[in-house]
Image (cartoon, helix red, strand yellow):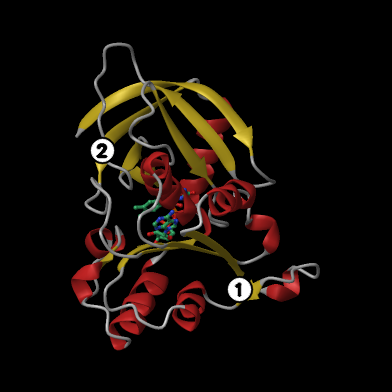
Amino acid sequence: MKQITCPIASIDWYNEDTRRILLDLPAGEDVTFHAGQYLQMVLPQKKCPFSIASAPHLKGQLELHIRPTPGSEDSAIIEELLDNAREIEIQVPLGDCFLTEKTDNPLILLAASTGITQMKSIVEYLEPEGFDYPVYLYWGVLSDKDLYLAELCQSWADKHENFHFIPVVSEPDTSPDWTGRTGLVGEAALEDIEDVSNATVFVSGGPAMVYATLDAFMARGMPEENMKSDIFSYAPRS
Ligand SMILES: Cc1cc2nc3c(=O)[nH]c(=O)nc-3n(C[C@H](O)[C@H](O)[C@H](O)COP(=O)(O)OP(=O)(O)OC[C@H]3O[C@@H](n4cnc5c(N)ncnc54)[C@H](O)[C@@H]3O)c2cc1C
């Protein structure tokens, strides 16, 4: 893990609250990471984790998607930094929830909100060689307007027979035009996939969502070691 200062190459808005940030890696800086790892933004008082949204084979830049948590002091500091700064100090790489090779079993990717960033890196790492086994990407959001990467995710499904994209809205009252799946993302996956005993499952979201998903998948026969999440080391269950 190294600490470096990266110039901000660009910032674009995906929707009213989520930004895509491209960081340039300083020339001569050799930054390697695995698909699924995260970095920490170094603030004066604290370090804040953000999954790397780009795949490791894309050299020279790192992509982040940042959405503020309403009412959070740290988020307010980060938003101000993004509004004004020209460079950002980061520590990279971090996290033990990643892929370094193709899996030889089905892969279930469960993302809550901006948890999609980690899954984007994993899918873009695997995608050039195609998918030998089924890959299921479930993306849970509160409202359909939060599905800012839906077109990209659907393009993977259109291109690869073995790739399935299932967006799930948990508060359909906020989305009057939504005709897709509703409910909780982990429950939706268990409704669709009968046998999870042989699947590798990546989960990205807050601790409550991740641990509820772990319990539900284990109750359906998934061995505990088959589920990977940053939360297991970042926020261990007491
Ligand atoms: C490993 C990790 C990766 C993260 N990646 C992103 C990201 O790509 N984009 C983003 O906008 N925010 C991400 N977050 C949340 C982000 O770090 C916080 O929103 C930020 O630090 C501001 O702190 P907070 O007080 O608002 O939120 P906190 O209260 O610190 O975070 C809210 C809760 O949600 C969880 N969480 C939120 N988003 C994610 C996520 N994508 N992956 C895993 N857990 C998450 C955190 O573990 C935490 O429990 C990530 C958090 C973690 C732990």
Left or right of residue 100, residue 121 in this image:
right
Front position in the image: 174 or 124: 124
Q: Residue at x 46, y 59 (%)?
A: 162
Q: Is mark 2 within 8 Å of ligand 1?
A: no
11 over 180 or under it: above or below: above
Check disc 1 and report its element: helix, strand or loop. loop
Image coordinates for residue 6, horizontal then vertical, percent: 38, 22
Q: Amino acid type of disc 1?
A: Ser
Image coordinates for residue 184, horizontal then vertical, percent: 53, 76
Q: Residue at x 51, y 77 (%)?
A: 188
Front position in the image: 75 or 186: 186
Q: Quadrant of the C terminus?
A: bottom left
Indicate the quadrant of ligand 1 in the picture.
Answer: bottom left
Are there few (<14), some (14-19), or many (20+) residues within 10 Å of tag 1?
A: some
Q: Earlier in the sequence, mark 1 or mark 2?
A: 2
The quarter of the displayed image where residue 48 is located: top left
Question: Residue 86: which disc?
Answer: none
- Give the alpha-carbon distance from disc 1 to disc 2, as whole Å: 32 Å
Question: Residue 170: which disc?
Answer: 1
232 over 75 or under it: above or below: below
Question: Residue 93: which disc?
Answer: 2
Q: Is residue 165 visible?
A: yes
Image coordinates for residue 27, horizontal then vertical, percent: 32, 11
Q: Is residue 45 visible?
A: no
Left or right of residue 130, residue 155 in this image:
right
